[in-house]
Image (cartoon, coloured by chain):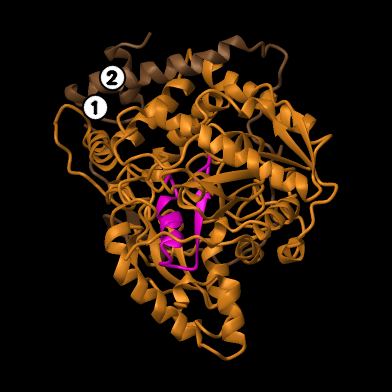
Chain colours: A orange, B brown
């Protein structure tokens, strides 16, 4: 068996027992990247190998890919946007520090939708990433490069960020495990902000055990992120228990709706049956405001994005365009021309939408109303979690769609996040894990959502399901 | 309803230059999205408190201690243009 097909925990066992060295592992993955990334195009930059000096000396000398929106000191970090081309951050994100401390080896920076604006990885200024299961299809987004690099065995695991489903939806499309932790669980210091009240960094891995290991590494309070929460980090691997007896699982009646692909529905229902047979108590619940989640999200996320992206103006780092007209003050002309050349169409659309909902005369009708709708959505979850421990839904309404299929229709693209968005609005931890394949051989994802800081409940339920099924052992054929 | 003039105005607020060619497409896209989000009008939110943030944090302070921070030199190392320890920009006044 080739080393690159193994999980982190399997590799660590082999390293510990002296069968292989950390250097063997890195070499195997380097070769794998050289062999398949030309087809998948998951990585936009190789290296920087920031962990090489201590690779082998740390506890986790594991090859990793990092989404291109987390700062790595002195290494170009662009959010896959032309406006940040050439930007080399003068500091490391906290998660990068933690990975390096553990001996992690950063083999590449992963492709993403520009500034994480998208669900398909097609808005990247470097061009799309392709789904390892079918190279004509998208890997999902926005952490599409992270998900595809793991699914294609180019790295052992990866970090992504999730604002409305950007870890979970690509994990589902690529047949791997992806976790958006509780808002505040993982420091975002050094993550380029998209929507600050929603963004979280999280792991994309080949199985649930690896997800727990990577969460152990990246979780915890950080004084440099004032939204990180100072609650103790448990050892998540202690929750890898094959037992769901008595676990109360809620199935929202609002999730089996029009637009849900019948094959996805069948797989999700079958997964629920598996959990039921293993002793879980399955009950129907209601999250009555679910249908307003996408609208709420696109008001709030774009408003925050328009504010966060105001800093990209050509003054400090990245792109600076030359003034083109003498009709305005040279600096204003430079701002407008830099942003014109630097941002792609989707970024411009979202910045304008956010600017509109925050502008005088529209603030109450849009932004404030969105914040109030968010309260209703959060209240739905609070009420549901009075009677259940975990909520199970599909991760996405369909399997991976074709490259180009939705790019000209922004609204249909937005609707692919219909199941993932509510967990961001409510700040809840949520995982996607493989639960089947459609008739085209494309992976299907199952989503599990828990109360704030109850990642352990997710790990227990997900591990039990995974260990009683074989979906996670299937691999795409790329050679 | 959103028209081209509205979009031109929003773009100028956002300091984004939109060409005439792009204007029609953006107007259509934004109009579509805004009519979709208008479904929130179905909700009675008069008595609902807004949620800006799930953690309800307020004024997070840290101890007032002097600690090392990014040096001026490091901050400017990859600046697009700098002059005597500052970022240099094009002329501000016409």
Q: Can you identify the residue that label 1 sits on?
A: B18
Q: Position of residue A166 (x, y in %)?
A: 49, 45
Q: Is residue A155 magenta?
A: yes
Left or right: A302, with B18 as reference point: right
The disc at residue B8 is 2
Quadrant containing the N terminus of chain B in the rendered view:
top left
Q: Are marks 2 and 1 on the same chain?
A: yes
What residue is drawn where x is 27% and y is 55%? B80
Asked if residue A102 can be seen in this view, the reply is no
Proximity of marks 2 and 1: CB atoms separated by less than 8 Å:
yes
Q: Position of residue A62 (x, y in %)?
A: 52, 74
Q: Kindly indicate the quadrant of the structure image that contains residue A265.
A: top right
Question: In the rendered picture of this protein, how many numbered marks are placed on residues?
Answer: 2
Looking at the image, tell me whether mark 2 or mark 1 is earlier in sequence order: 2
Residue at (52% x, 37% y) in the render: A263
Residue at the image point whose x is 50% and y is 14% from the top: B38
Up-down: is A31 above or below A384?
Answer: below
Give the camera-side residue of A246 and A105: A246
Gap between marks 2 and 1 measured at Cα: 7 Å
For the view shown, which residue lies furthest in the bottom direction?
A: A18
On-image quarter of the C terminus of chain B: top left
x, y percentage for residue A104?
Answer: 52, 74
Residue A389 versus residue B39 in the image, above or below: below
**What residue lies at 50% left-to-right and 50% top-to-bottom?**
A171
- Decide whether residue A135 is among the magenta residues: no
**Part of the protein shown in magenta:** A140-166
Subunit bearing disc 2: B
Q: Position of residue B35 (x, y in %)?
A: 44, 14
């Amino acid at each position: 068996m080739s080393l690159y097909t193994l999980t982190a925990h399997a590799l660590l066992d082999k390293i510990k027992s002296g069968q292989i060295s950390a250097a063997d592992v890195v070499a195997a993955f380097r070769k794998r990247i050289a062999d398949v990334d030309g087809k998948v195009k998951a990585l936009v930059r190789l290296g920087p190998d920031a962990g090489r000096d201590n690779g082998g000396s740390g506890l986790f000398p594991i090859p990793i890919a990092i989404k291109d929106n987390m700062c790595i000191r002195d290494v170009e970090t662009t959010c896959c946007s032309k406006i940040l081309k050439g930007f080399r951050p003068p500091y490391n994100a906290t998660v990068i520090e933690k990975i390096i401390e553990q001996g992690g080896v950063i083999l590449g920076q992963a492709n993403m939708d520009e500034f994480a604006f998208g669900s398909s990885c097609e808005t990247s200024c470097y061009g799309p990433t392709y789904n390892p299961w079918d190279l004509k299809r998208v890997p999902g987004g926005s952490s599409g490069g992270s998900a595809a690099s793991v699914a294609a065995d180019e790295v052992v695991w990866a970090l992504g960020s999730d604002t409305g489903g950007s870890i979970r939806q690509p994990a589902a499309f690529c047949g791997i495990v992806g976790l958006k932790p509780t808002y505040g669980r993982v420091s975002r210091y050094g993550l380029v902000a998209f929507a600050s009240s929603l963004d979280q960094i999280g792991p994309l891995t080949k199985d649930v055990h690896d997800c727990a290991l990577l969460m152990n590494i990246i979780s915890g309070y950080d004084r440099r992120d004032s939204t990180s929460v100072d609650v103790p980090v448990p050892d998540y691997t202690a929750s890898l228990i094959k037992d769901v007896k008595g676990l109360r699982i809620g199935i929202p009646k609002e999730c089996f709706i029009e637009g849900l692909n019948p094959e996805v529905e069948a797989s999700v229902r079958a997964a629920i049956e598996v959990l039921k047979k293993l002793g879980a108590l399955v009950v129907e619940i209601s999250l009555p405001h679910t249908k307003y989640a996408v609208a709420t999200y696109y008001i709030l996320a774009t408003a925050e994005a328009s504010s966060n992206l105001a800093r990209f103006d050509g003054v400090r780092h990245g792109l600076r365009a030359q003034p083109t007209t003498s009709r305005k003050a040279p600096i204003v002309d430079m701002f407008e021309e830099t942003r014109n050349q630097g941002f792609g169409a989707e970024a411009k659309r979202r910045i304008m939408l956010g600017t509109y909902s925050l502008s005088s005369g529209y603030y109450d009708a849009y932004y404030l109303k969105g914040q109030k709708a968010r309260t209703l959505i959060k209240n739905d979850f609070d009420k549901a979690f009075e009677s259940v421990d975990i909520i199970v839904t599909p991760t996405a309404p369909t399997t991976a769609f074709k490259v180009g299929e939705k790019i000209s229709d922004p609204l249909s693209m937005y609707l692919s996040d219909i199941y993932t968005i509510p967990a961001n609005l409510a700040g809840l931890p949520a995982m996607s894990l493989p639960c089947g394949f459609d008739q085209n051989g494309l992976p299907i994802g199952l989503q599990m959502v828990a109360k704030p800081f109850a990642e352990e409940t997710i790990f227990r339920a997900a591990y039990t399901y995974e260990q009683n099924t074989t979906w996670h052992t299937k691999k795409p054929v790329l050679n | 309803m959103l028209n081209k003039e509205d979009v031109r105005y929003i773009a100028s607020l956002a300091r984004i230059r939109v060409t005439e060619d792009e204007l029609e497409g953006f107007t259509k896209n934004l109009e579509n999205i805004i009519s979709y989000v208008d479904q929130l009008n179905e909700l009675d939110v008069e008595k609902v408190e807004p949620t800006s943030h799930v953690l309800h944090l307020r004024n997070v302070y840290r101890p007032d201690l002097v600690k090392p921070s990014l040096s001026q030199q490091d901050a400017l190392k990859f600046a697009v243009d700098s002059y005597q320890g500052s970022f240099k920009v094009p002329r501000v006044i016409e």
